């Protein structure tokens, strides 16, 4: 199951939870067949180390904030909030 399928079917997350238009407005009217760009297509990883750190923090805060909220609301540890759970070493 892909991450998108898991978020939509298992957690009932809408596209607007992560995806937004160029003004920051949530994309809540999209459907799974829509061609939505990945984060890096609009938010390219900067080359400057200081800016890379800001980018990484923004991406992590978006995901981890939602994951923590879910775990708190469900009183579970269903979704990962630590590095190694998402960034699996191969």
Image (spheres, rainbow, N blue to C red):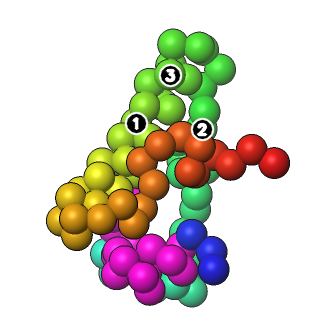
Residue 11 coordinates in the image, percent (x, y) = 37, 77
**Mark 1 vs mark 2: in front:** 1
What label sits on residue 13 in the rendered view?
A: none
Residue 47 coordinates in the image, percent (x, y) = 65, 20
Circles 1 and 2, Cβ within 8 Å, touching? The answer is no
Alpha carbon separation for disc pair 1 and 2: 12 Å
Alpha carbon separation for disc pair 3 and 1: 9 Å
**Mark 2 vs mark 3: in front:** 3
What label sits on residue 53 in the rendered view?
A: 3
Alpha carbon separation for disc pair 2 and 3: 13 Å
| Farthest-out residue, right | 90
Q: Residue at x 47, y 43 (%)?
A: 82
Using the rendered view, name the quadrant where residue 5 is placed.
bottom right
Q: Which residues are magenta?
A: 4-25
Using the rendered view, name the quadrant where residue 2 is placed.
bottom right
| Left/right of residue 75 with respect to residue 24 in the rendered view | left
Q: Is residue 47 above or below residue 38?
A: above
Structural crowding at the residue carrying mark 1, measured as other residues with C-alpha within 10 Å and reported as few (<14), some (14–19) or many (≥20): few
Indicate the secondary structure of the residue bearing disc 2: loop
Q: Residue at x 68, y 49 (%)?
A: 88
| Farthest-out residue, front | 76
Tell me which numbered mark, 2 or 3, is placed earlier along the sequence: 2
The answer to which of 41 and 66 lies nearer the viewer is 66
Q: From where the camera sits, is residue 27 visible? A: no
Q: Is residue 11 above or below residue 56?
A: below
């Amino acid at each position: 199951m892909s991450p998108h399928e898991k978020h939509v079917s298992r957690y009932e997350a809408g596209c607007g939870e992560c995806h937004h238009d160029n003004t920051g407005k949530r994309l809540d009217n999209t459907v799974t067949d829509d061609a939505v760009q990945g984060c890096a297509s609009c938010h390219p990883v900067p080359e400057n180390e200081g800016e890379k750190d800001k980018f990484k923090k923004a991406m992590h805060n978006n995901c981890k904030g939602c994951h923590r909220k879910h775990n708190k609301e469900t009183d579970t540890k269903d979704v990962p909030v630590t590095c190694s759970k998402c960034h699996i070493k191969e």
